[in-house]
Amino acid sequence: MIALKIGGSSLKNLDSLDQVVRLIQEPAEGKKIVILSALSGVTDHLLKSVAQALQTDRRINGLLDYLQTLHREWIVQAIDSLPIRSKVLDETDYLLSRLEKLLYGIAYTGECTRRTRDLVVSMGERLAAHLLAACLTDRGTPAVGLEADKIGMIATGDFGNGNADLRQTEKKLPQTVVPLVEQGILPVITGFFGATPDNHTITFGRGGTDYSAAVVAAALNCRELQIWKDVDGFLTADPVIVPNAQPLYYLSYDEAAELSYFGAKILHPRTVEPLAWRNIPALIKNTYRPDAPGTRIGVEKRPHDGIIKSVTFNPRIGSLRLEGASIGQQVGFLHRVVSVLSDRDINIISVITSQTAVNLLLEKNDIVTSKAYIEAKQIPYIDNIEPVTDVALVGVVGEGLATTPGLAARVFSAVAESGTNVEMIVSGASQVAQYFIIKEADVVRTIQAIHREFFPVHEPGNGGVES
Ligand code: ASP
Ligand code: MG
């Protein structure tokens, strides 16, 4: 089997729907399974609906009308067969009536838990999966829309940021999906969410369909996962900053994971985990340029001559500096700090320590509240707590980076020559990535300088990095 992830950016209008149907129908070795996002813009619309319902019930009708019109229009225009059309219109109405009840519930109670919000936003994928399945059936490929939380996609963790339980999912999902495939029916599975063990819908965070698709591909032991987006795949840098950034044709799991986790907004950060777990190769492709080679991701490590494959940055990471003359000497100091934050569900991205300061790398959104929690605990030996938010994390990624002499020197001299001061270095935890902190204002010239150092000769549109 081959799993195909279709993103919302590949479902922008009826033309793109036609394109998606064509690429699903393309003959291939092996049977296909589709994992699908909501139509473009729908998840944002659902989140907005929750926010508005919290204020008043008066806008709910309008919000629902928008979704009904959008899906109806697509259905009516894309599907010829009247029975297929009327069946999917019924499914659509049913989902929208559930959504209506939820939104009125939110409006009347004036509250929305994370759990309820997850259920609301899951509606976009449900609507889309039934729509695409009907469309495929209408065009000669019998298909069925499957809602992931009803077919054994099991997940735990926080609502809004769940994690698939890979072992449970691997037990359950094949029982529903494989028999369909054997009957020649193409499953179109909703991305973005699963069910908790006590059967509540839980989402995987924004962009979570990439992750869902990887979980499905692993649980069904697929030959390959194809991820269809509106970009060609990973590049040597963000093309907004580096116009002559080159496509990357191959990344190891570790390279792809580091890039997704810290910077490049190509894949959901946890997509690689299920793939690596069952050794499933992935291929990122552009729906609108299917002939472009895309980026392959796999188990093999293939260092590239220049070692560095991509330079990336994350402007959402800052630090909280805990200062104290003797904190490096205090047994259990880090433990106390970490438990204050973990009790509040705040994720510490990294820790950089010295004898007189501990720097916690955090999401910028978490910095002010983290400071307040730590102050409230009155942990001894801290003289001062300094929030640092005018910074960004820059990373260079490539297999072989940690073991190649002189590489860090090359990176940092390029940075220095661009006039940028390196504030902190996150040292050697990863074999394939080197991270450091600079002022946010220096990001553009720093990225450009590193890219010039490692990819000096390319012209726009030329080349690409083979391995
Ligand atoms: N529809 C969800 C979102 O927009 C999930 C996804 O697209 O992957 O975040
Ligand atoms: Mg989306």
Image (tube, rainbow, N blue to C red):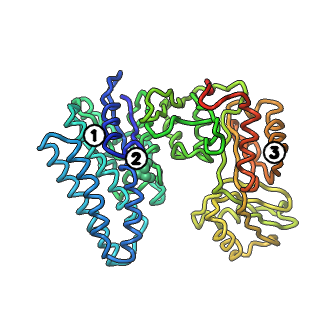
Q: Secondary structure at mark 2?
A: helix
Above or below: residue 81 compared with residue 204:
above
Q: State the image quarter where residue 331 is shown.
A: bottom right
**Label pair 3/2, CB-CB below 8 angstroms:** no
Closest to the camera, between mark 2 and mark 1, is: 2
Marks 2 and 1, Cα distance to the nearest angstrom? Answer: 25 Å
Q: Name the residue located 74 percent from the left edge and 47 percent from the top edge.
A: 445
Report whether 252 appears left or right of 95: right
Q: Residue 209 shows which numbered tag?
A: none
Q: Nearer the viewer, residue 171 or 31?
A: 31
Q: Residue under label 2, please give it.
A: 8
Mark 2 C-beta to ligand 2 under 8 Å = yes
The image position of residue 248, as x and y in percent, is 59, 31
Q: Nearer the viewer, residue 437 or 465?
A: 465
Q: Amino acid at mark 3?
A: Ser
Lower position in the chain sequence, tag 3 or tag 1: 1
Q: Residue under label 1, please give it.
A: 176
**Label pair 2/1, CB-CB below 8 angstroms:** no
Q: Amino acid at mark 2?
A: Gly
Closest to the camera, between mark 3 and mark 2, is: 3
Q: Name the residue located 36 percent from the left edge and 44 percent from the top edge.
A: 11
Above or below: residue 185 compared with residue 441:
above
The answer to whether residue 375 of the structure is visible from this angle is yes
The image position of residue 431, as x and y in percent, is 70, 36
Q: Residue under label 3, please give it.
A: 418
**Label pair 3/1, CB-CB below 8 angstroms:** no
Q: Name the residue located 29 percent from the left edge and 34 percent from the top edge.
A: 178
Q: Amino acid at mark 1?
A: Thr
